[in-house]
Amino acid sequence: MAIDLVSEASANGARKFKACELLGVTLRTLERWKKNGTVDQRKSAERKIANKLTEEEKQMILSTVNSCEYRDLPPCQIVPRLADKGIYIASESSIYRILRKERQLAHRGLTSPVKHKRPDPFEATKPNQLWSWDITFLPTQVRGIYFYLYLIMDIFSRKIVGWSIHTTQTSGHAANLMHQACLDEKVDEGQLVLHSDNGSPMKGATMLAMLEKLGVVPSFSRPSVSDDNPFSEALFRTVKYHPSFPIAAKFETIFDARTWTIKFVEWYNNVHMHSSLKFITPSQRHMRDDIAIMQNRHKIYQSAKENHPERWSSSARNWELPHTVTLNPNRKNRINTGTQKYAEKSVA
């Protein structure tokens, strides 16, 4: 219709581009319509797909792949089996697309996915009740060769209570480190819970035997779930992002790695003001010096507020540290904690 109207106007002496302006199209669009036909080339236009499967074909594909013979097989195995019988129903990509749309693509095998139980929550109200440990890589100057840093930390105080560096990952090294850490911290039998990942050094026979001998209760993360061991993961990030960590130079010998780690542990435990501890050092928290420090900070802030009340629009900063630290809290613990924080905020 637009072509006819513009042609009629042009025959009566009107300019083509003026007639196109009145119709809301450009002259180039009009010329393209004359040359290629009036096909709507807009991205939002509805198009008829020539190779689109019909609804009957889709149902036939679904009934085929869900039959007793093929219901436990993925499309990549169904298509060649059908081809051997002289049958072609659709391409692999089409079958994958249909199954994905119908939510029938995941776990088509005979085996069902294994559901791992979330680790039991543990709470610590003082040091040496709940520890976490893991192993991380330390790069060497030889590609493909690493040193392995074993680190044990106290979750309540965030203090590093034990570490060692070796060229291999074994449960024997872990057992020796755990034994030494318990001796250093004077841990009694039945006093401690040790949380770790699911690696072979963590669940090896030597390590488990040592934990049983020491009276330490083991706790393990779910496979491939790093959130179950967040404290060690956060500590390793602090290790790798420390300004003195040799990212470019890397470690030449294991002696260099151990020398650097000695300095880092000294800094982390006694100098580093931990943000999760409201900026006291892990050693201060571990030795319970935090109680006096926080009381002193509270007095200073209360005094500052009393001297200049006009500068304070709300209550003074809360310097109180939580009395309980929970590892892997369940949903009920999280709800209760959130409700308690909201109530405390409302009262304040």
Image: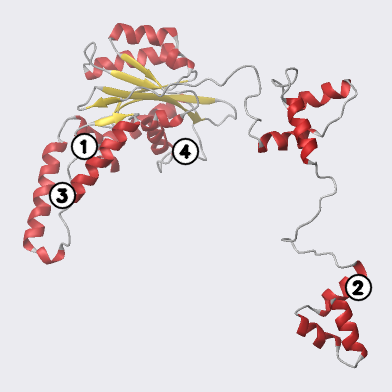
Is label 1 or label 3 in front? Answer: 3
Tell me which label, 1 or 4, sits earlier in the chain: 4
Residue 34 is labelled as: 2
Q: Are marks 2 and 1 in contact (CB under 8 Å)?
A: no
The residue drawn where x is 37% and y is 34% is: 235
Q: CA distance from mark 1 to mark 3?
A: 17 Å
Q: CA distance from mark 2 to mark 1?
A: 77 Å
**Relative side of 184 to 28, left or right:** left
Is label 2 or label 4 in front? Answer: 2
Mark 4 residue type: Pro
| Residue sitting nearer the eye, 122 or 18 | 18
Residue 322 is labelled as: 1
| Residue sitting nearer the eye, 223 or 78 | 78
The residue drawn where x is 48% and y is 19% is: 199
| Residue sitting nearer the eye, 17 or 98 | 98
Q: CA distance from mark 1 to mark 4?
A: 35 Å
Q: CA distance from mark 2 to mark 4?
A: 69 Å
Q: CA distance from mark 4 to mark 3?
A: 49 Å
Tell me which label, 2 or 1, sits earlier in the chain: 2
The residue drawn where x is 72% and y is 36% is: 98
Is label 4 or label 3 in front? Answer: 3
